[in-house]
Amino acid sequence: MARMHARRRGRSASRRPLITENPDWVSMSKDEIEEVVVKMARDGATSARIGLVLRDQHAVPDVKLATGSTVSGIIAANELKPAIPDDLSSLMRKAIGLQNHLNENKKDLANKRNMQMVESKIRRLVKYYKREGHLPADWQYSIKTAELLLE
C-alpha cells in the first residue's frame, strides 16, 4: 500500500551488511567450498539450493566473498550448467502443476488465469535467454516439452 503523504511505496526487506572481504570466522577454504559446490551440482542441486546449504550447514555467508566467484560461476567453470536455467525450470514445474490441476478441474477460472500468467512469464524469460544465448534460437516452450524435460 502506498504511503499517506509521500504517494509512493516504501521499502520492506532486509539488506545484507556491506562487507567487502570474507569474514575471519568462516572455517572453510576456497577449495573446500568449490568442492562442495561441484559435488552438489553433480547431484543435481540448483544454485539457490547450493547457496542455502553452504549458508546453513557450512557457515559460508557469501560464496562470492569466500571464493571470488558466484555459485553459478563455479558451476559454469566446471561445465555442469543445466540445459535449462533454474528460474525457467521452476516456472515450468509450476505450469505443469497448474495444468494437472486444470485437467481435473475444468471450471477453475482462477487457476486458468494463473496458468496464463505463468506461461507469459515463461515466454518472456525464454525470449530473454534466447537473446542472451543461454537457450538455442529454435527452442520452443510447450507444456508437453516441459513435462518431457523436467520429469
Image: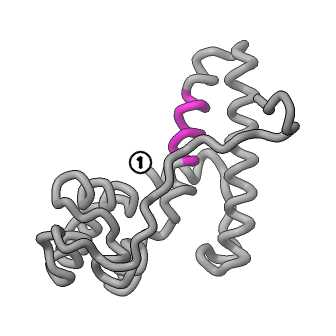
Quadrant in the picture for residue 117: top right
Asked if residue 1 is positioned above or below residue 95 in the image, the reply reads above
Q: Nearer the viewer, residue 58 or 77?
A: 58
Residue 145 belongs to the span the image colors magenta: no
Question: Residue drawn at (24%, 74%), measured in percent from left and top?
Answer: 38
Question: What element does badge 1 sit on?
Answer: loop
Report whether 53 appears left or right of 87. left
**Does 95 appear in magenta?**
yes
Residue 129 location, quadrant: bottom right
Task: Tell me the residue that label 1 is attached to.
Answer: 151
The residue that appears at 76% across and 29% down in the rendered structure is: 1
99 w.r.t. 139: above or below: above
Question: How far from the left and from the top, in percent, is residue 65?
Answer: 34, 77
Q: Can residue 147 be seen at all in this image of the molecule?
A: no
Residue sitting nearer the eye, 124 or 12: 12
Assign the magenta stretch its main secondary structure.
helix
Image side of residue 95 versus residue 108, left or right = left
Determine the residue positioned at 30% across, 81% down. Answer: 67
Q: Is residue 94 above or below residue 128?
A: above
Q: Position of residue 39 (x, y in %)?
A: 19, 70
Residue 116 appears in the figure: yes
Is 92 on the left or on the right of 132, as rendered? Answer: left
Is 136 on the left-hand or right-hand side of 21? right
Q: Position of residue 111 (x, y in %)?
A: 68, 23
Q: Amino acid at mark 1?
A: Glu
Tally of marks: 1
Q: What residue range appears in magenta? A: 91-100
